Amino acid sequence: MKTIYTFGNGQAEGRADMRDLLGGKGANLAEMNLIGVPVPPGFTITTEVCRLYNKEGREAVVEMIKEDVKKSIAHIENLTGNKFNDPANPQLVSVRSGAPVSMPGMMDTVLNLGINDAVAETLAAKSGNPRFAWDSYRRFVQMYGDVVLGMKPKNKTDIDPFEAIIEEVKEQKGVTFDTELDVEDLKNLVVRFKAAVKVNTGKDFPTDAWDQLWGAIYAVFDSWNNERAILYRRMNQIPEEYGTAVNVQAMVYGNMGNNSATGVCFSRDAATGENLFNGEYLINAQGEDVVAGVRTPQQIMTEGSRRWAKLQGISEEERAAKYPSLEESMPECAAQLVDIQHKLEEHYHDMQDMEFTIQDGKLWLLQTRNGKRTGAAMVKIAMDLLREGAIDEKTVIKRMEPGKLDELLHPVFDKSAVKNAKVVAKGLPASPGAATGQIVFFADDAEEWASRKKKVIMVRLETSPEDLRGMSVAQGILTARGGMTSHAAVVARGMGKCCVSGAGEIKVDYVNRTVEMRGNVYKEGDWISINGSTGEVYDGLVATVDADLSGDYAAIMNLADKFSKMMVYTNADSPRDASVARKLGARGIGLCRTEHMFFEGDRIKAMREMIIAPDEPRRRAALDKLLPLQRGDFEGIFEAMDGYEVTIRLLDPPLHEFVPHQLETMRELADETGVTLEDVKNICNSLEEFNPMLGHRGCRLGNTYPEITEMQARAIIEAALNVKEKGIDVHPKIMVPLVGVKPEIKMQADIINATAQKVFAERGKTVAYKVGTMIEIPRAALVADQIAEVADFFSFGTNDLTQMTYGYSRDDAPKFLGEYKKLGLLKNDPFAVLDQEGVGQLVEMGTKRGRQTKPDLNVGICGEHGGEPSSVKFCARLDMNYVSCSPYRVPIARLAAAQAALESE
Ligand code: PEP
Ligand code: MG
C-alpha cells in the first residue's frame, strides 16, 4: 500500500483526479506542480492512512508509515538544500489537513513546525531578520499549543491563553499592535507561552522537530473527529468514513519583512459571480492573519481596492497611502498572480479560490480549489463559463447545487422601504441578500431563540468555527472585524446566508450584550436589518419583496427543463400559492389539500355544523353551505393553473380537528345550530381519538360519510365545467387519501363517478377527469397491483408512508430525531430526506406493481420529499411522471430532476 505521495519542483506522484485518496488540497498541490505553478515541495499522507488510523489506532499506523515519512522529509530536504531537525541549516514545514471535499475552518493547520531555540537563532542570523525568526517561533508555539496540545478555549467567552499573554505584554509595554513588539518582547512571549503550555498540559513543550511533526500528524487525523468537523459533515452530508489527508510542505514565509506577504484570492467574485479577479493580502504576515480578521486586509487589484475604499468611506489618498493594492505595492508579483489565476481557471474550468505567499519577492501558491460561492454567483459563473465556451450546457446543470437556488428565490429589501430606512452602520457586502431579525451575540442564544421561532441576526466581533451552529439558524450575520475572506464571509456564502462583515465602526460589547452603532445603543433582542449585497445595516425591521427571476436564473431553469425527463408539480391549496408556483415553473398541482380551505373564516362554522349534525338531512344541509365555497376555490385554482393538471385530494384529517375545544365556542355552536350544549359536548368528546393519525381520517371519512365525498366531487366537477365554459383548459384529478384496501378506493370512485354523471346530466355538459389515490399506507404499496385496477393514478404520500413504515409519529418524532442523529442512529431526518433503503423499497414496489396492472399508470410523489434533491433523484430513477413540492422548492426540484436525467446517461 502506497501511503505517501510526494510533489515538488514541477513533479508530482499525485494528480487532480486523486482527491479521494489525497484530499482536495493534496490532489491540487500535485496538479499545480504538474502544470508549472510554483508550489513549495512537500508530500501528502493519504486518506486511506487516516481511515486505518481511525480503525486500528495510532501505533499500528505509525509503524506502517514511519519509514515513508522519513523518506519524504528527505525528498523536501533534497529540493531545498536544508535539513529537518538540524539547527545549523534548518528546514521548517507546515502541516495541514485536506479532506476529499473542502471543509473550511473545520480542520487544523500548524505552521513553522521544526523550530526551537537553536533553530530560531539560526533563522535570525541567516535571514538577518531576528524579528521574523522570533515571530515565527511564537506563532508556532501558539498554534501548536492551541491545535495539537488542545489549549484552544472550548468556551467562546474564554480567552485564548496565548492571546491573554500577548495582551498583557502589550499593556506592560504600552503598545496597541502586535507589530510594535520587538525581538526581546517576542522572545519573552516564547518563554511565557512555553510556561503556559507546561501549566496547562503538565508537559514540557516538545523541542525535537520529529516529535513536533508526529504530534501534528496525529492532531490532523484526530481533528477529523472534532465536534466542528462532525457538525460540518452532518450539515453538508459528507460521509463520516472519508477521512482526511495530511499535507506536509516546506515553509515559505510571508512574514519575512516588507517584501513578503500572504493572501487569498478568487478568480471571480464569489458573492456576485462578476468576472473580476479579486482577493486580499497582508504585508509581512502569515497564514491565518488574512482570514482571522484581526488586521484589515488590503485588496489585491487596484480596481477592487478602490471599490473597497468607497464602501468604507476612505478617500483615494488615504487608500493609496495606507491600504495600497498588491498591484501597487508589489507589481511584479501581482502580475504573475494574475497570470497564474488565469492558468488555473482555464485548467480547472471553474472559479478558483487560491492561497499564496510571497517570500522576499518570490510568489508561491499554497492551495487552489473550486471556490465556494453564493447561489447568485453559482448561476452567473456557470452561465458566463458557458458563454465563454469553457463548459457545455450539461456541465452547467451538473455543477448546480440545487439547494443553493433557495437564496435566489428569497426576498430582497423593498426599494421604497430601504429609502426610508435609517442606515446605522456600514460594512462589507460579504454574502448577498436581505435579512431582518433580533440581535443576538452568541451561537447558543441564536440556536435557542431560533428554536422559539424567533428571527435573529448574529452580531459578533468576528466569527470562528464555534459559531457555525448559530450562523446556520440566524437570518444573517453582522461582524465588526474581518474582510471579504474572513471566516464569517466564507462560511456565510457557503451557507447562502446574508452577511455583512468588517463593519469596523460598530462597537460590540459581549459582556453587556450591546452593540453601539453611530451613537445608538442596541441591546440583545432589538431589531436590525442587514443588506449583504451593499454592506448596509439598518435600524429596525425593513420590509422585503420577492426576488427577480429573469436573466441567468431563467436561462439555467430552461436548460434544466431541456434535460429533465420528469415533471415538477406543486403542492398548493389556494389560487395564490398556485400562481406563485407557476411563476417558479410548476407544471401542475400534485396536491391540493382541501381541508385547509375549511379552516378559513366563516367556513369552519359550516364545517362544524356538518360534523355535529345529528342526521343525514341536516348533514346535507350543512354541506350545501360548504359547496359553493369549495367550488369557488377550485375555480380559482383551475384558472391559475390554466391548462395544467390539478390534483385535488378529498378531505383527509380526522373530524375532531375541526370541532371546538372551548366551552364558549361550543355554546356558540349550540346556539347557531339549535343542538343542545350537552349534545355538542358529547359529540365533540366522542370524536376524540387516542391516535388520530391512525384513526377516523382519509377515505375512512368519505366512506362512512359518503355525503362529504359527494359534496367535494360535485364542487370539483361543477367548478371544472364552469371554468371550461370560460374557454379555459381544465384537467381535474380527484385523489382519494389513505387507501389501504382496494374496496376503499372502489367505494370512493363509485361515489365520485355517480356524482359526476349526475352533474353532467344536470348541466348537459361533460368534462374529463381522473380518479386516483395516494399511496401512503404500507399495505397500499404491497397490494398496489390490485389498487391500480381502480385508480387512474398514484401519488406517494411519503409523509404518512414514512410515519407508518418507521412507526415514528410525524408529530412526536422531532422530540427524539435530533438526539438520534447525534447518536448516529439515523443519518438524516427521514421526514426530510426520503429513506431510500427502507421506505424507498415500498415506493419502488408500489410503482412496479401498479404499472404491472396498468403499464402507463401515472405516478408521482407529493410528500415533503418531493422538493429534496436526493429524494427527487430517487423518484427520477424510478421513472415517476412527476414530483410535487411546495412552491419555493419547485426550482430546486426542477434542477435535481435534470441532474438525475444527466446522471443516468
Ligand atoms: C403525505 O402523507 O405524504 C401527504 C402528502 O399527505 P399529508 O401530509 O397531508 O398527510
Ligand atoms: Mg398523508
Image (cartoon, rainbow, N blue to C red):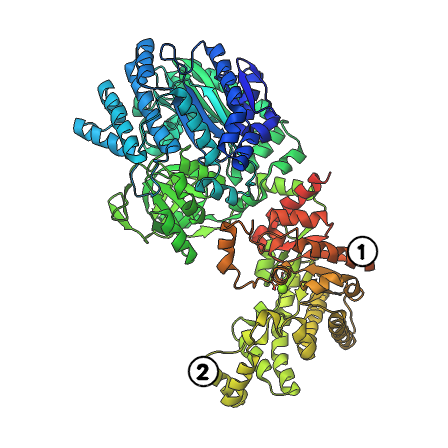
Q: Position of residue 244 (x, y in %)?
A: 52, 32
Quadrant hosting residue 656: bottom right
Instruction: Establish if 229 lies above or below 853.
Output: above
Q: Is residue 402 left or right of residue 356?
A: right
Q: Is residue 100 visible?
A: no
Q: Amino acid at mark 1?
A: Asp
Q: Position of residue 505 (x, y in %)?
A: 29, 38
Instruction: Tell me the element at label 2.
Output: helix
Q: Position of residue 1 (x, y in %)?
A: 61, 25
Instruction: Tell me the element at label 1.
Output: loop
Q: Is ligand 1 closer than 8 angstroms to the Cβ of mark 2? A: no
Frontmost residue, 263 versus 58: 58
Frontmost residue, 276 versus 830: 830
Query: Label 2 crowding class (10 Å Cα cut-off): few <14, some 14-19, many 20+?
Result: few
Q: Is residue 239 left or right of residue 362?
A: right
Image quadrant occupied by the C terminus: top right
Q: Is residue 264 left or right of residue 656?
A: left
Q: Residue at x 42, y 43 (%)?
A: 468
Quadrant hosting residue 727: bottom right
Q: Is ligand 1 closer than 8 angstroms to the Cβ of mark 1? A: no
Q: Is residue 786 visible?
A: yes
Q: Amino acid at mark 2?
A: Leu
* Disc with the residue nearer the chain's start (2 vs 1): 2
**Residue 663, labelled with which disc?**
2
Q: Which residue is mark 1?
A: 856
Quadrant hosting residue 759: bottom right
Q: Position of residue 145 (x, y in %)?
A: 34, 31
